[in-house]
Amino acid sequence: MQELLERLGRGDTQIMAMCQQANHAWSDFLEELRGADTGTLSARLGFFEPTFTRIFGSQRFGQNMMTWTGFAALYDTNAGWGQNLDRAKQLAEAFARSNCSAEVKSEARSCVISYELERHVQSPTPSAPAPTPTADSPQKKRRW
């Protein structure tokens, strides 16, 4: 996100063309996989990642922009998710399960938070329940 903002601040006009190309790539990808299950979508994301390196001209910038442009292709700032909410939830889960790079998966988590999807998305691996304190275990006081 930092590189995007830096380049926009410098007036880099190529950014609009890159984002438009990414939007088209996402539209085609999502249309091709309409009706696919989350596992299939997840598997295809790993193969789709290099497309963004090509579009954005570098691996780092491509990894950074892949998820943001994906969710942006489904979201409308005036109408919200609308009919795309289920697709956005599926995309979030697919990124979490995918074999995409750690950088892409980290950006996907940021998108889920930014777009307020976290209450809709299950984590890919269930976490263990918190241990129940017993009468013998000392209680720690939280100081916040």
Image (spheres, rainbow, N blue to C red):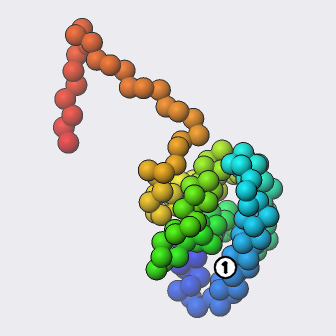
Residue at figure coordinates x 58%, y 91% from the top left: 11
| Amino acid, disc 1 | Cys
Relative to 19, residue 74 above or below: above
Residue 114: x %, y % from top left = 46, 63
Residue at figure coordinates x 19%, y 29% from the top left: 141
Q: Is residue 60 left or right of residue 124?
A: right
Image quarter for residue 134? top left
Q: Nearer the viewer, residue 92 or 67?
A: 92
Relative to 34, residue 22 above or below: below
Residue 23: x %, y % from top left = 69, 76
Q: Nearer the viewer, residue 61 or 17?
A: 17
How many numbered discs sit on the rendered protein?
Answer: 1
Image quarter for residue 97? top right
Residue at figure coordinates x 69%, y 82% from the top left: 20
The answer, for residue 21, to whether it is visible in the render is yes
Mark 1, residue position: 19
Which quadrant, please, contains the N terminus?
Answer: bottom right
